[in-house]
Amino acid sequence: MKTIFAAIALSLAMVGASAAATVINKDDQSHILIVTEGSTKVEVVLNAGATTLLCPAGCFITMPSGDRETLSGEETIEIINGSAVIK
């Protein structure tokens, strides 16, 4: 019985971890994003043409243009000409 509960808990954890904001850098240069989750700030370097997943539980993100956005963890963001387009 404990094995069944452990399997269910693991499945739920995997589903929760799969939801994250997708950031796609469509520019020919790298950009730095500042991700703030709670009281922790992290700089994320997104290379030209790269894609990354961020903020599975929501966060604030400072875009290359300096704009700050609130993400829930379900968005797709494209960086085009240094500006972010949230879809």
Image (cartoon, grey):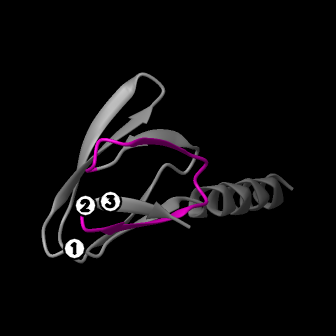
Q: Residue at coordinates 19% horizontally, 57% vertically from top-left?
A: 31
Q: Residue furthest right?
A: 1
Assess whether mark 2 and mark 1 are in contact (beta carbons under 8 angstroms).
yes
Q: Earlier in the sequence, mark 1 or mark 3?
A: 1
Does residue 27 appear to the left or right of 51 in the view shown? left
The image quadrant of residue 34 is top left
Which residue range is magenta in the image? Answer: 64-81
Q: Secondary structure at mark 3?
A: strand
Q: Which residue is mark 3?
A: 83
Q: Which residue is mark 1?
A: 27
Q: CA distance from mark 1 to mark 3?
A: 10 Å
Judge depth for marks 1 and 3 and give the one in front: 3
Q: CA distance from mark 1 to mark 2?
A: 7 Å
Assess whether mark 2 and mark 3 are in contact (beta carbons under 8 angstroms).
yes
Q: Residue at coordinates 87% horizontally, 56% vertically from top-left?
A: 1
Residue 41 is situated, as x and y percent measured from the top left of the image, at 32, 31
Q: Residue furthest top?
A: 39
Q: Is residue 80 found inside the magenta-colored segment of the image?
A: yes
Q: CA distance from mark 3 to mark 2?
A: 4 Å
Q: Is residue 2 found inside the magenta-colored segment of the image?
A: no
Does residue 63 appear to the left or right of 37 in the view shown? left
Q: Which residue is mark 2?
A: 82
Q: Secondary structure at mark 1?
A: loop
Does residue 4 appear to the left or right of 81 in the view shown? right
Does residue 10 appear to the left or right of 22 in the view shown? right
